Image: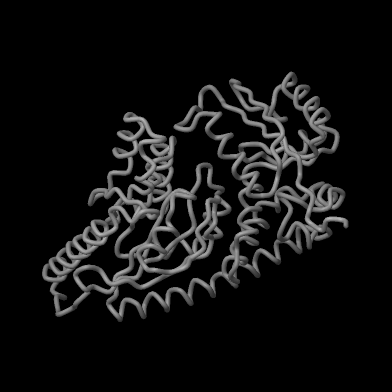
Amino acid sequence: MKSTRPRLERAVLVGVELKRRRGLWGLEESLTELAELARSARAIVVATVTQRMDRPTQTYLGKGKLEELKGLLYAKRASTVICDDELTPTQQRNLEKELGGAKVIDRTALILDVFAQRARTKDGRLQVELAQHEYLLPRLAGQWTHLERLGGGIGTRGPGETQIETDRRLVRQRIQKLKRDLEDVRRHRARYRARRIEMEVPVVSLVGYTNAGKSSLLNRLTNADVMAENLLFSTLDPITRRIKTPAGRDVLLTDTVGFIQKLPTAVVAAFRATLEEVQESTLVLHVLDIAHPNAAQMAAVVEGILKDLGIADKPRLVALNKADLLDENVDAETLSRALQLADGELGGVFTSAETGTGLDTLLREIDDALSAEDEDRELTAVLDGTYGPRRI
């Protein structure tokens, strides 16, 4: 019997490190994460090509590495190249030409492809489609015929499969329509937040690097059944659940989309409606996979994105999650760096969504943090003359 399952694409990963732009993430670490993304998109990684260079080239790689890549594509019977950076339209066209028609996608297209798989609500699908169209618009020259010839696959799910014949004018029209629809989503969520404010129920937003265990932590704290898998971006759509703290306070916990290094600007812009949930929350709970070898880098990425969103100064706690795995994976230096980078205004708590370790302490810390917010708000109200009875 012939299998009806889609054929897995065989892919070669390509990473470049510019000597003058070295960041917190090493090239090998970044490519390890890229391989996880590729597997999430149902690709088989068959080889990796790396290069360190002084300046970027119009083909992403130098001539020698291009020849190496061509040989690997042939030897490994691979049809797809995945680059670890966002390529310029020129780089992508030149690289495809040099490789004789192999499909070339970059990190941004791969992330958007995984998002397209994970989006389950109308709001989530709208946000993903907008991000994909914004990304594809400057790449339309030659892109549609290329996608048509390859017949879909990773990097082409969503609008890429249904609008191959669409020209720039129609894509721009679609972008405007999606933006209007998402503006309706923002207004709806704003009304919902206004009702929550009237009810005087504080909101705690869970943020963190993808696969840090936010959904598992939410499930453990609320006895819910939110999908929690060992996958990148297993949760894309915001989910809110109500809990009661040890002090008897009603609190809303909101799980949000996970962050990742090199997060595409198109994603941040398209997911503005979702990220506003974090901006308007009472308290931010940063969930950090403290057992991951790159915990320090992950903490820095999340802190940087919070700063970009203008909420770095919002009160927050840090849940140092997966503490049950600490002895297996993390050395003392990495742990120290992670603790320093993730040191929120109110401190951190070691937790394990798997075993339940530290969850009672975490709930007490949430209580204390919200009580401190009550006091700050009341003091501000007294100073500006608007103080009145209000209970959270």
Numbered label tally:
0
Quarter occupied by residue 15:
top right
Residue drawn at x 49%, y 27% as measured from the top left:
22
Residue drawn at (40%, 55%) of the image:
207
Q: Nearer the viewer, residue 236 or 323?
A: 323
Using the image as rendered, state which of residue 340 and residue 281 is in the foreground.
340
221 versus 207 height, above or below: below
* 370 over 211 or under it: above or below: below
The way the protein has been coloured in the rendering is one colour
Q: Quadrant of the N terminus?
A: bottom right
Question: What is the quadrant of residue 69 in the picture?
Answer: top right
Which of 57/221 is in front?
Answer: 221
**Foreground residue among 215 and 60:** 215
Quadrant (top left, top right, bottom left, bottom right) of the C terminus: bottom left
- Looking at the picture, how far across and down is residue 28, in whole percent? 55, 29
Position of residue 342 measured from the top left corner of the image (x, y, whole percent): 32, 43
Q: Residue at x 63, y 27 (%)?
A: 56
Task: Name the quadrant containing residue 78.
Answer: top right
Q: Is residue 242 above or below residue 327?
A: below
In the shown orientation, is residue 319 left or right of residue 9? Answer: left
Query: In the image, residue 36 lies at what x, y percent?
Result: 59, 42
> Residue placed at 83% from the left, 29% from the top?
74
